[in-house]
């Protein structure tokens, strides 16, 4: 009976949506982009009722100028993906400033448009904890909070609805933390239909950016039946940070293995074997010194497995190509054209917050170049992560400029 009820709900939603569907494919067309920052100073939620702490919003507006955005356009990019944290809109602390937050989001999108860039407004939930009470986990686990998220999607769609649909698109949820299979997959399809229906009801002309479950991965997209969405004015997104061993070196938030891994080159054969062995040896020493005793043997074995899976050009190419091949097979099966697919995030960490290791810029430029080639070979648009911060391409921390190699590579791409 629960599945019958869900099926009926989907049928009703589909009938309602069809009344307002645009009679054409995606009106928003992009090729090359970059993700802007979501936060830079991360003000505590206790201060979200203070205008100077929360506005302008998103927070990158405090340091990034229209000239900075125009420089992205001049470098050969045609759009920005603009992460917007929904948490302030769901927090009672911002009730008196809610209208200002919406207005600031719209001003920010128009600022990018004025610089010649198209914009994806991306509702980008972050994990809660520490200085914030609402995040992805809470929205997914609390039914009433998810209801409020649906209404936020509706309200944001209404805010954006009068913008030029060729210059602005709306992404409804970033990296949903629901599994890829079984009941969790069905749960995501139900939730996806709810947020899609809310967005389409209020923004009838805008292209909507949608993803699969499983943190927005290729695996999650491949598990999704796109026909549940009765609309052609959509773009399907997936994210890939493969190979994680090399792209997230030193990331302290990425489990109990990656924080111990620094100093590996990209690709692994970029240096002589003796130099690579020495780098691997230093990682092993770090694990022996810093990892919990009961985890050391397992982590050392896992390191060996990961290195062995990437230590030739052929193995690395296969690991990086796998997500693209999964998406291509899904698209072919479901009749989704390459122009309606977006690699919404990919990137290589520059420096983790509070640590000393900095990934050499030539390795990062090589990685971004190789991922771009994989996307463009298949006709997919792409958006690098990200403008500043730990993965900073243009800036690092506190508005300091990052090394120029990645952007120089972007400038060198053929138009």
Image: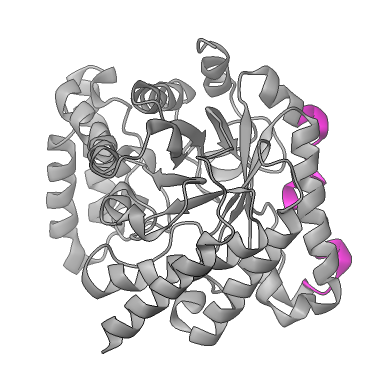
Q: Residue furthest bottom?
A: 1
Colour mapping used in the image: one colour
Q: Quadrant of residue 155?
A: bottom right
Check the image and report above or below for 185 versus 237: below
Where is residue 202? Give x, y as percent.
67, 62
Residue 251 is situated, as x and y percent measured from the top left of the image, at 42, 50
Q: How far from the left and from the top, in percent, is residue 309?
A: 14, 37
* 145 relative to 89 in the view: left or right: left
Q: Compare residues 83 and 351 and report the one nearer the observer.
A: 83
Q: Kindly identify the residue that appears in the image at 82 percent across and 48 percent down.
A: 107
- Residue 86 visible in image: no
- Asked if residue 187 lies in the magenta stretch, the reply is no
The residue sitting at 70% across, 71% down in the picture is: 89
Magenta residues span 48-68
Relative horizontal placement of residue 313, taking residue 55 as reference (left or right): left
Q: Quadrant of the N terminus?
A: bottom left
| Lateral position of residue 243 relative to residue 396, left or right | left
Question: What quarter of the picture does the C terminus occupy?
Answer: top right
Q: Is residue 347 left or right of residue 281?
A: right
94 over 62 or under it: above or below: below
Q: Looking at the image, can residue 411 be seen?
A: yes
At 70% from the left edge and 56% from the top edge, which residue is drawn? Answer: 41
Whether residue 50 is in magenta: the answer is yes
Asked if residue 2 is positioned above or below residue 335 in the image, the reply reads below
- Residue 193: image x %, image y %? 45, 67
């Amino acid at each position: 009976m629960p599945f019958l009820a869900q099926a009926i709900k989907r049928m009703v939603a589909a009938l309602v949506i069809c009344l307002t569907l645009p009679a054409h494919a995606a009106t928003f067309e992009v090729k090359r982009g970059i993700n802007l920052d979501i936060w830079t100073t991360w003000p505590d939620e206790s201060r979200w009722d203070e205008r100077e702490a929360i506005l302008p919003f998103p927070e990158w507006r405090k340091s990034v100028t229209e000239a900075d955005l125009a420089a992205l356009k001049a470098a050969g990019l045609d759009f920005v993906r603009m992460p917007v944290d929904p948490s302030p809109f769901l927090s009672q602390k911002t009730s008196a400033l809610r209208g200002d937050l919406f207005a600031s989001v719209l001003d920010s999108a128009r600022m990018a448009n004025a610089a010649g860039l198209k914009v994806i407004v991306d509702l980008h939930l972050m994990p809660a904890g520490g200085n914030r009470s609402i995040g992805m986990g809470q929205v997914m686990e609390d039914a009433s909070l998810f209801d409020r998220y649906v209404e936020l999607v509706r309200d944001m769609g209404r805010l954006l609805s009068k913008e030029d649909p060729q210059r602005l698109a709306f992404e409804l949820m970033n990296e949903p933390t629901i599994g890829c299979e079984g009941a969790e997959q069905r749960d995501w399809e139900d939730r996806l239909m709810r947020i899609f229906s809310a967005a389409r009801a209020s923004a009838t002309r805008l292209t909507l950016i949608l993803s699969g479950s499983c943190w927005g991965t290729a695996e999650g997209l491949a598990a999704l039946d796109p026909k549940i969405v009765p609309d052609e004015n959509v773009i399907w997104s997936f994210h890939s940070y493969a190979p994680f061993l090399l792209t997230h070196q030193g990331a302290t938030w990425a489990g109990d293995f990656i924080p111990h891994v620094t100093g590996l080159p990209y690709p692994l054969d970029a240096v002589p074997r003796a130099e690579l062995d020495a780098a691997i040896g230093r990682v092993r020493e770090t694990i022996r010194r810093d990892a919990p005793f009961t985890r050391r043997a397992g982590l050392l074995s896992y390191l060996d497995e990961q290195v062995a899976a990437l230590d030739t050009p052929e193995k690395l190419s296969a690991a990086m190509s796998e997500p693209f091949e999964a998406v291509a097979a899904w698209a072919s099966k479901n009749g989704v054209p390459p122009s309606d697919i977006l690699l919404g995030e990919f990137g290589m960490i520059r420096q983790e917050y509070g640590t000393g290791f900095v990934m050499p810029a030539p390795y990062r430029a090589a990685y971004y170049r190789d991922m771009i080639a994989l996307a463009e070979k298949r006709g997919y648009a792409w958006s690098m992560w990200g403008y500043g911060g730990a993965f900073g391409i243009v800036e690092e921390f506190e508005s300091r400029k990052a090394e120029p190699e990645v952007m120089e590579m972007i400038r060198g791409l053929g138009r």
